[in-house]
Amino acid sequence: MNIDLQPKKVSALLPTDIPFQTAYWSEVKSRLGWQPAAFDYRSSTGQAGDVLLLTRTLDSGPGVAYVPQGPEAGPEPEQQGLFLEALSLALAKHLDSSVAFVRYDLPWTSPYALEAAAGQSWPGHPAVRLRELRMNFGTRTWNLRKAALDLTVADALVIDLRPPVEKIFAGMKSKTRYNIRLARKRGVSVFRAPFDKLPLFYDLYLQTAKRNGFATCAYSSFAALFSASAPGRGSSETIFLLAARGSDILAGGIFVIAGRQALYLYGASAGERRDLMGPYALHWDAIRLARNKGCLTYDMGAVSPGPDSSHPFYGLYRFKTGFGGEIVHRSGSWDFPYHQESYASFRTLESINQLAAAAEPAS
């Protein structure tokens, strides 16, 4: 397979429902030290589209290239490895020699999920070695590697917003419906917060992270989301902060709309007054707001891939699946190394959890 790759202006990226593949996202990441570039591509087998590429030199030394949730348009599952190999080799001609590898955070549905779609439960991904064998089958270089971390969400809960709002509500689990009504009964309200409330949200976010033991992003990552969408900057995406309050702020969330999709990027909740069910009110209002803005789907973000109580995202699974919807299983992040020694050093750092701070994952 061959791919013809043509550079273009980032502002000329095609409309998409993936916020991470927009000119808006390129501006967000450029404020955080990444260099954006855009390309049109056409493969010899007929796939065509465009792609946003981000590059950066990390503190550890190597340069990296990153395609966040892209390319959007890809081939059939059995040709994905051939496609990524050809695209990586084409991109290499446009990259600095210091770039050790390119990482693709694939938005494509996992081939294993597609095979399980015919009435069977999700079996989960096989071992990494078997995934790599399948991805590299038929390639010339056998050079594609499954990343140790998925930089954006590989397993997400997505709600269809096309039915009437009453039907969406009726499709939720009874406990979720009860908690939404309870929040309203106890006086919880949801409002769209102005940008100057972002420090308040960030403080709540840090409390949530400490309580639940997950790594945090710097405040600059949140500020960039809003400064990049300031009026007059030509962004067609919508970024907004919602907050649920009783007498105090109970929960908050940052949401982005791109095309016909709304995406829940970051969230936080207070440890006190959990009996007021603030997070339930927050997401119910987000669903209605997204639907009123013409969105067809609401991506609630990370969940465990199934009802596995040992998974670190099982709590998110229990909460989010109460809202209905379906779990989408994506292929996750894959690497194509250009310099094997530098790449191996980077993977060593990644194995001790240093990549998250260096690459600032989107969600």
Image (cartoon, grey):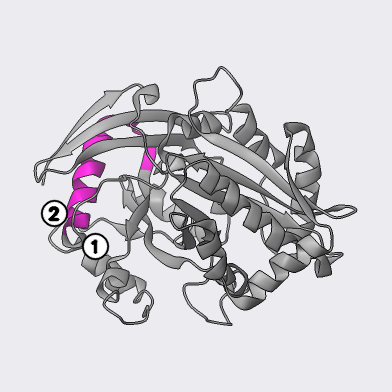
Provide residue 191's location: percent of width, then percent of height.
Answer: 74, 44
Compared with 154, 124 (above or below) is below
Quarter of the image holding residue 99?
A: top left
Is residue 349 visible in the rendered structure shown here?
Answer: no
The residue most toward the right is 247
In the image, is 47 to the left or to the right of 115?
left
On the image, the x and y values in percent for residue 348 come to 49, 59
Q: Main secondary structure of the magenta part?
A: helix
Q: Where is residue 352, by image quadrant?
A: bottom right
Q: What residue did someone put label 1 on?
A: 135
The magenta span reads: 79-100
Mark before the other along the chain sequence, 2 or 1 = 1
Please report the residue visible at 16 percent of the width from the left and 57 percent of the height from the top: 79
As rendered, which of 131 and 38 lies closer to the eye? 38
Which residue is situated farthest in the top direction here? 232
- 105 up-or-down from 312: above or below: above
Q: Which residue is mark 2?
A: 140
Assess disc 2: are there few (<14), some (14-19) or many (≥20) residues with their C-alpha within 10 Å of its C-alpha.
Answer: few
> What's the residue type where badge 1 is placed?
Met
